[in-house]
Image (spheres, rainbow, N blue to C red):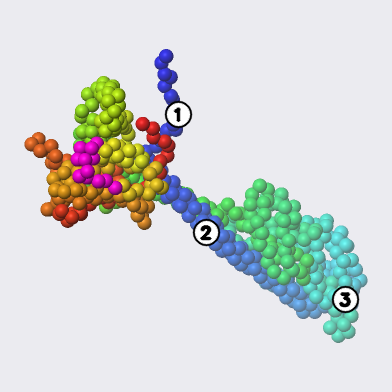
Amino acid sequence: MKATPLRIFTREKHSLRSFITLAISITVTVILLCSTFFYYYKTSLLLRGNLEQSITGQLNQVNQNIMEQIDTIDSTIPLFLSNTMLLNALETSSFPSSGRNSRFQLEKQMSDIYYSAPLSGRNFTDAIYIVCDSGTILTSYTSGYASAPLYQGCELLESIDPTDTGLLCRTLDSEKNAIYFARNLFNGNTGNHMGLFIIHINLDKWVQYCAKGLDPYWFICLYNQQISAFSGQNMAEKDFGLKGGTNPDKDSVSFQELSLDGRTYFTASRSLNEFDLVSVVAAPKDLLLEDLDDTMKSYLLLLALTVLAALSISLIISRAITRPIDKMIYYIDRISTGEVKSLPPMQMYHEFDVWAQSFNQMLKQLDIYYNDNFQKQLLLKNAEIRALQSQINPHFLFNVLNTIAWKAQISDNEEIYQMVISLGELLKMNTLSKERDFITLDKEMEYVKFYMYLQQMRFEDKITCHIQIPDHLMKCLIPCFCIQPLVENALTHGLEPKRGKGRLIIQVIETDRHEMEISIIDNGIGFAQIPDISKITSSEKDSHTHIGLRNLNKRLELLFGSASRLNIESEPNICTSVSMRIPIRKEEKSVDF
């Protein structure tokens, strides 16, 4: 049955270069857009403030013009009263049909006085009326065409208080384009009321006159509940929106933004309380902000060019940053195929050079680790082969040894029986433990005890062995075949050449660093000069060299580090100690042989 391949779905990965380019471009774009919006917002606020000042200033100028015209109107009235004929007519209220004081002559005098006054140059007056208390009305038409007779506007006369001494301003519902300024006339000697002086003003012409010098796209408006007049043409449709939108204060200018007939205007308005009028100056918003819009178009073009420049620069920067990375990837691929052994120096940036050096150091450490692990496995195999070199056919040897032991037992030779049994157990343990790296201390000591029994039977009473091991350390794990080579070395090189009796001590103690120190101590001939274990080599002439010590020393270094190397202390013919330190590691599961 064929195995079904496992499919792993991964999302598409983007290159570092594209990420850097995109990140720089987006960052620059966002910053520029924010600065653009901020610039537009602050500039529009500043421009709006300037426009408010400009429009308010224009409104104040218009209001000043209006008040100047009103003062001119008011100053014209004394000119008429200074005429003796008119003054006598008012005082006597008599108008003959002919002669010097006839109505025709009086009205002619009114016309002459008007055209000699500054008011005539304004060209916004339609008529002048002098109303006597007797009801006679003297009229002088000043606009070139006859206005409606005043008697049709009797509501105007009725609205004037005859005791009021100031200049009055009145409007009529029936006349949307007219405004009247009136003043009560009193006798200078008696103080009695003589009549009423009325100036009929054409509102449209007056507003047009007040709007002189105003920008052609701006307009002014005068209005109250009855009338409204605009300086611009075709403004009637804005009447309702302007009246409803402006809400001026009594003593200050009101600045507002209004939408009139689909177009937005900035408006400044003020109430002329003494004349019941509201004056307004309006300017189209789109024309006022046209310069700002033109500036923003140029700014947006500059923004686009800046983004393109940022994109180009980001490409250059990303290429400069990722170039050494691409170089590293290229050499790492070659390292993976075995073409090269290390990365070349990365001199473009200090960080990459440090990275390359660290990577090369890691490669060296991996190579050392690989070689050390290989040597550890090789030494372990050599130790197993050395311990089992006589084992050609284990089952055959076990059967033969069991047969010898059975014969010895039948012959009542207990020593031979025990020797054969010990040798069989020794070979059995070597055979069964050859694939293990670690073994418990008690199992290792069983192996050592069998070995020492055989050696003691060989040397009889010449050698004694003492074992000093705490019970709580018996289940700790130690490397296989780490004690027996030391015991063999002590017997072979220390005790066997010694004259007289020899003593061997196997000692295990626990240190304060959670380690156990294993020492093999003997009173043999010792070392005249302590050898360098790492430099011991094998010899074909002498099979009893210290090659076992060198192999064990290398295995300990590979397993636990340099701190676990063998340590030799010797005083010839008195005491020799070979010791090692290994970490205490409890047995995790039982080890059966």
Picture coordinates of residue 363, whole percent (x, y): 25, 42
**Which residue does the numbered mark 3 point to in the structure image?**
163
Q: Earlier in the sequence, mark 1 or mark 3?
A: 1
Q: Is residue 178 left or right of residue 558?
A: right
CA–CA distance in space, label 1 to label 3: 102 Å
The answer to whether the residues at label 3 and label 2 have Cβ atoms under 8 Å apart is: no
CA–CA distance in space, label 2 to label 1: 53 Å
Q: Nearer the viewer, residue 458 or 33?
A: 458
Q: Answer with the quarter of the image where residue 41 lies.
A: bottom right
Label tally: 3
CA–CA distance in space, label 3 to label 2: 56 Å
Q: Is residue 550 depicted above or below 224 in this figure?
A: above
Q: Residue at x 78, y 56 (%)?
A: 176
Q: Amino acid at mark 3?
A: Thr
Q: Is residue 572 left or right of residue 148?
A: left
Of labels 3 and 2, the one closer to you: 2
**Which residue does the numbered mark 2 point to in the structure image?**
43
Q: Secondary structure at mark 3?
A: loop
* Start-end of magenta stretch: 454-466
Q: Secondary structure at mark 2?
A: helix
Q: Earlier in the sequence, mark 2 or mark 1?
A: 1
Of labels 2 and 1, the one closer to you: 1
**Which residue does the numbered mark 1 point to in the structure image?**
9
Q: Is residue 587 left or right of residue 53?
A: left
Q: Secondary structure at mark 1?
A: loop
Q: Amino acid at mark 1?
A: Phe
The answer to whether the residues at label 2 and label 1 have Cβ atoms under 8 Å apart is: no
